[in-house]
Each structure stands twice: as structure tokens, then as C-alpha cells.
Image: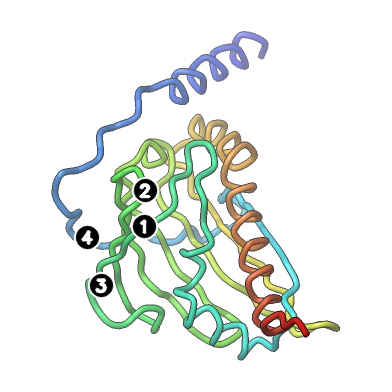
Amino acid sequence: MKYRLVFVSLIAASLAACAPPAPPTEPVAWFDPPDLLADEKAYVVSIATTTVPMSPEELRAFLVDQGSLLVFMEPVGSIAPPVGQTAIEGVWPDEGARRRLIQQDGHQLLERSLKNETSDFRYQAFGFTSGIGRGVDHIYADWSLTPVEGGTQFDWTYRLAPKHALARIVVRRTRDNALQPFMQGTLDRMTLAAQATKSGPVTTD
């Protein structure tokens, strides 16, 4: 058992230490997305949450007006935020819509909208050209908006599907060191912007 743990740790370290791939020079073509995992326990899960002083309907309208969560994203560690998007089919975030995202470091990924209801938005990300694609097959994500005292609780969940058992170790580290703070920071900045909108402009006598 001791030698097996050492072996697994060495393989995981090797995966993490691989030089990052170069960004593609051409747009990534759409392809059939991977199947979602039947057992959600097989995913590595990351959850960020906040409470926004708006109803679910107001919050979704605010996000559409702002340009979704993308405008509130900032880089953390190996996570580079999207800075551009190209529609492939439909209008995002309508159910069935498809798009390509361009990240700050030049890498790309593909997304498809799986469900688009006011309080339940679900989507899948895959086709990563960045280093995360070495260990992650796809991400199954959702927004859950629940009315609570003081507004709406916004839970943002990422479910990362490791490509194999050894990749799971690296994926967990990426979640803890970069993805979780990336997600929570995004929601925190969004919440501050929403609060400022509800408060209205500051006036002086």
C-alpha cells in the first residue's frame, strides 16, 4: 500500500508539472459533447454561494444586462477567465444554445446550455484546449437561485469529470487552489455590483 501511494503521488505530480499547451491558432470546431456521468459522486464538486438583494427574476435580468457572470471573472492561478464568446447555435443562455469561449490566455472551450429556467440554469463545458483538458473530460455546472430573507441565495456548482483515477488527484488540487477561489471571487464581485444597483446612485447636497 505504501509503494502504491508513492507511485500515485509521483504520477499526479508529473501530470501537474507538465508544461502548459500552446493556445490554438484556429477556432475550435464543435463536436459532440461527452456524456454526463450517471453517478454524480464520480465528479469532483466545487460550490460557491452568495446572497443577492434581488428576486430570482431581478437577478437573472441583472446578469443578462451585465453580460452574465463573465464580466465579474478574474484570473486565479491556472484559471483564466473568458474574454470573448462566439455563438455556434442558438442564443445563449436559451436551452440547446452552443457557444465557444475565448479565454484570457488564448485558450478555448465549448459550452452548451442544458436547461434555462429562472431559478435553475444548467450547462456543460468541454473541449478545453488549456492544461485543464489533460485531466478534465467535461464540467457539468448549474446556477440555483433560491428566494431567502433579504433576497436570493445564488449557488453556483461546478462538477468536474476527471479523465481517470490519477487525474482526480490533480483535479482536486486545482479545485482547492484555483477554481474555488475563482468561483467565489466571481460571485462576490457580482454581489457588490448588484448591491450598488439596488442602492442607486450616491447623491450629495
Tell me the residue at 63%/62% (across/down): 189
- Element at badge 2? loop
Mark 3 or 2, nearer chain start: 3
Residue at image mark 2 = 104
Residue at the limit of the structure toward the top, as seen here = 3
Please report contact status of discs 1 and 2: CB closer than 8 Å, yes or no. yes
Distance of label 1 from label 3 (alpha carbons): 14 Å
Residue at image mark 3 = 87
Density class for disc 1 (Cα within 10 Å; few <14, some 14-19, many ≥20) is: some
Mark 4 or 1, nearer chain start: 4
Closer mark to the observer between disc 4 and disc 2:
2
Please report contact status of discs 4 and 1: CB closer than 8 Å, yes or no. no
Closer mark to the observer between disc 1 and disc 3:
1
Mark 1 or 2, nearer chain start: 1
Looking at the rendered structure, the kind of residue marked 1 is Val
Density class for disc 4 (Cα within 10 Å; few <14, some 14-19, many ≥20) is: few
Q: x, y (%) of residue 171?
A: 53, 38
Above or below 64: residue 107: above
Residue 179 tag number:
none
Residue 31 tag number:
4
Locate residue 51: give its quadrant. Answer: bottom right
- Quarter in which the N terminus is drawn: top right
Mark 4 or 2, nearer chain start: 4
- The front one of 9 and 127 is 127
Residue 83 tag number:
1
- Element at badge 4? loop
Distance of label 4 from label 2 (alpha carbons): 23 Å
Q: x, y (%) of residue 26?
A: 14, 49
